[in-house]
Structure formats: C-alpha cells, structure tokens
Image (cartoon, grey):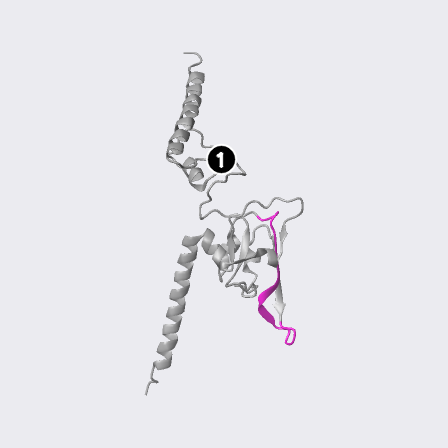
Amino acid sequence: MYGKGILKGLGVTLKRFIDTYLDDISWWMQGKKRYYTTEGVAHRSSKNTRGIFTVQYPEEQLIQPEEFRYIPFLIHDGDDKKDIRCTSCGICAKVCPPQCIWIVRTNDPQTGKPVPQPAEFYIDMDICMNCGFCAEYCPFDAIKMDHDFAIASYERNVYNLEKLLKPASYYAEIRPLNYNKEEEARKAKEAAKAAKASAAATATPAA
C-alpha cells in the first residue's frame, strides 16, 4: 500500500512518545529521577530504556566506558608533583604519529649528565589524534589517556608539564580495572626481583 512506510515510521514515533511518559510515571512512582542523574543517564543508555533516550548535553553526559580515551596526561605518585614517573626517555615522542610531543631532558648542572626527569614536556592537543600509542609504548606507565574531552578553547591547546601532571589516584578513579591490573603486575615483578636478590645473597659459593 502506498504510504505504508510513512505510517510505520509515524507509529514508531508515536510509540516512543507514549513510552516516554509511561517510563517517566514509573520512575516518579518509585521516587527516582530519570533525568539529570547518573542513574537516569545509565538507564537511557541501556537496552532496557523505553521512550526517549536523548541525553541533554551539556547538562547531562553519557557515562564513559573505562577504555574511552582522549588526550594524554602524565602520572605522578603521591601528592608531590616532583615524584613523576616519566624519565624523559623520549619513546612516546618517537612513536607519536603526528609528532605532537616535545620533551626537554633535565641535565645535572654540575656534571652535565642527563637526569631521568623531564625539565619540560609539551603536547599539542590540537594535533593529537588520540591514538594512545604514547601510553601503549611507555615502559614506565608514566603517560595515560584521559577521559576529559571538553578542552575546546579560543586559544591553541598546547599543554605544558604543569597542565599534564595528574596523580595516580586520578588514574585509578577513571580506569580502575587497568590500574589494579598494572599494580598487581608491578607488585609481582618487585616480589620476583626481591626473591631473586634474596636467593643470590643467601646462596653459598661453589667449592
């Protein structure tokens, strides 16, 4: 029949319209908020939602999965920003496809020898393609991918060391599964290293 497709489409729209109010009444009777709450957004993002599933951005934001990645950031342990994991080895800058990372290595003022700590660290976020290669190849787990995507500005987004540094606790908050897995691997490695050193110390020399 001519126009049958249009009627089907209007039927879907009408069903969504009615289901929206039915779901709203259901949530209201339970004393819960379907809008502007984390629970409400999670429900409307799930397969169980009925009616409208639109998220009212920026008042509401979708719940980001743990593996969501946007811009990189540097990790420091504890509260002291000087306790930075980065050793300025430069691997992240080498593997970066758009070459948006610049590192200035620290040198000892007396000997002139390099110190395993960056004096300056820059990432041009306007060039960054959010590929995550820097985090993947970093041998010290010093650089990770952030969930923060709201970085729009009227100026060029070149992040310096101060702006890039975030505590390990922040990383544990946004990516708990990855953090726990890395911590377990690190502790196992340290335990194996300590056991090896203890065994070497107690071993008797061959006659």
> Looking at the picture, which amino acid does disc 1 mark?
Val
Q: Is residue 84 above or below residue 206?
A: above
Residue 136: x and y in percent read: 48, 55
In the rendered image, residue 56 lying in the magenta stretch gets the answer: no
Question: The N terminus appears in which quarter of the rendering?
Answer: top left
**Residue sticking out furthest to the bottom:** 207
Residue 46: x and y in percent read: 40, 37
Decide which of 1, 77 is in the foreground and name it. 77
How many numbered marks does the figure carry?
A: 1
Residue bounds of the magenta highlight: 108-128
Decide which of 32, 22 is in the foreground and name it. 32
Q: What residue lies at 40% left-to-right and 57% top-to-bottom?
A: 180
Determine whether, in the image, residue 5 is placed left or right of residue 129. Answer: left
> Which residue, given by chain and number where applicable, does mark 1 sit on?
55
Q: Is residue 169 above or below residue 201?
A: above
Q: Quadrant of residue 192?
A: bottom left
Q: What residue lies at 45% left-to-right and 52% top-to-bottom?
A: 175
